[in-house]
Amino acid sequence: MSSYFKTFAVALLGGFVGASLRLPPAQADASDALWIKGPDGRDRIQIATYTAASERGLPLVGLFDNRSQLRLLLRLAGPNESPVMVLKDPRGRDRLVLGLGLNGSGDPFCSITDSQGRKTDVFGHY
């Protein structure tokens, strides 16, 4: 990410949300990530790309709660780069997953997982 873009993003987002931003140093094998912190200094939003070989370059946006636990993940996933939204409980477990077919069909799916860890497909298949 260019230094001009980083400066612009910091100025723009910092002015809108009144939060501090943390930009990690560039690393050869890591993605640039933009972290937005709340007034308490805790992580609130992460905007980045995946670095694993199978997902390299695919974007993600993570929203964190008051304890800095990831609670909502928006991402592209699978070989077809399908949009997916993952809602997590306070323990970090996926509880509701919505998206468009990861298998290439493009058909929507909704999967819920109860407190006992039992997964149920509401519609479609994930």
Image (cartoon, rainbow, N blue to C red):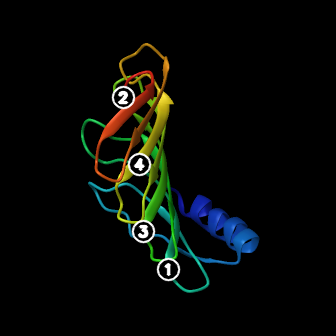
Q: Name the residue under label 3.
A: 69
Real-space CA distance between mark 4 and mark 3, rounded to the nearest whole angstrom: 14 Å
- Mark toward the start of the polypeptide (4 vs 1): 1
Q: Which residue lies furthest to the right in this view?
A: 16
Question: SS for tag 1?
Answer: loop
Mark 1–mark 2 Cα distance, whole angstroms, equals 32 Å
* C-alpha span from label 3 to label 1: 10 Å
Q: Residue 114: percent from the left, percent from the top?
A: 37, 47
Question: In terms of secondary structure, where does tag 4 sit?
Answer: strand
Instruction: Say which amino acid is labelled 4.
Output: Arg
What's under tag 1, amino acid-wise? Arg
Tag 2 or tag 1, which sits nearer the N-term? 1
- Sequence order check, earlier mark of 2 and 4: 4
Q: Is residue 71 above or below residue 73?
A: below
Query: For the residue marked with disc 3, what is the amino acid?
Result: Gln
**Residue 41 pos. (x, y %):** 52, 84
For label 4, the residue is: 95
Q: In which quarter of the image is the C terminus?
A: top left
Circle 3: element type: loop
Label 3 crowd bin: few (<14), some (14–19), many (20+), radius 10 Å: some
* Marker disc for residue 42: 1
